[in-house]
Image (tube, rainbow, N blue to C red):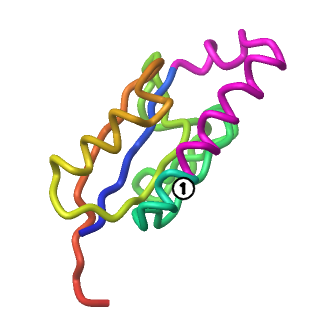
Amino acid sequence: MKFAFLLYEAEDAWAGLSEAERREVIGEHMAYVEALARAGAMVAGEPLSPSHTARTLKAGRVEDGPYADTKEQLGGFYVIEADTMDAALDWARRCPAAQYGTIEVRPVPDYGG
């Protein structure tokens, strides 16, 4: 079964990191991806550009920025394979983003396509 991890974080926290600290965080995510891949759980994952680069389509109109004006913004995602929600939550706990942000874990339905 597939699960999506939606990674939310305070964008100003990333902006406040030094280049060395950013490289460290990226390295932690790369190690996490390697662990997922070794376990056969990795499906997909990507960071996202800052929310100010986003556009939202709402009722047919394009608006600047994200729909929600909150402190934490969607900063990236992973899609993994796991047998159960509990197994997915175990992987989410190991994600580096769990140390500094919020991870929303959702099952990805399989509609047979």
Can residue 19 be found in the magenta stretch? yes
SS for callout 1: strand
**Residue at the outermost right position:** 19
Mark 1 neighbour density, 10 Å: few (under 14) some (14–19) many (20 or more) = some
Residue at x 61%, y 33% (from the top left corner): 28
Quarter in which the C terminus is drawn:
bottom left
x%, y% of residue 45? 54, 55
Residue designated by label 1: 45
Residue at x 53%, y 44% (from the top left corner): 32
- Say left or right for 46 vs 81: right
- Say left or right for 1 vs 45: left
Depth order, front residue of 69/45: 45
Q: Amino acid at mark 1?
A: Gly
From which residue to which does the magenta span run? 10-33
Name which quarter of the figure residue 14 lies in: top right
Residue at x 55%, y 36% (from the top left corner): 75
x%, y% of residue 24? 71, 25
x%, y% of residue 82? 27, 61
x%, y% of residue 25? 65, 27
- Say left or right for 26 vs 34: right
Residue at x 45%, y 23% (from the top left corner): 69
Please say if 28 is above or below 4.
Answer: above
Helix, strand or loop for the magenta stretch, by majority: helix
Depth order, front residue of 41/62: 41
Quarter in which the N terminus is drawn:
bottom left
Can residue 26 be found in the magenta stretch? yes
Please say if 48 is above or below 36.
Answer: above
Name which quarter of the figure residue 26 lies in: top right
Please say if 13 is above or below 112.
Answer: above
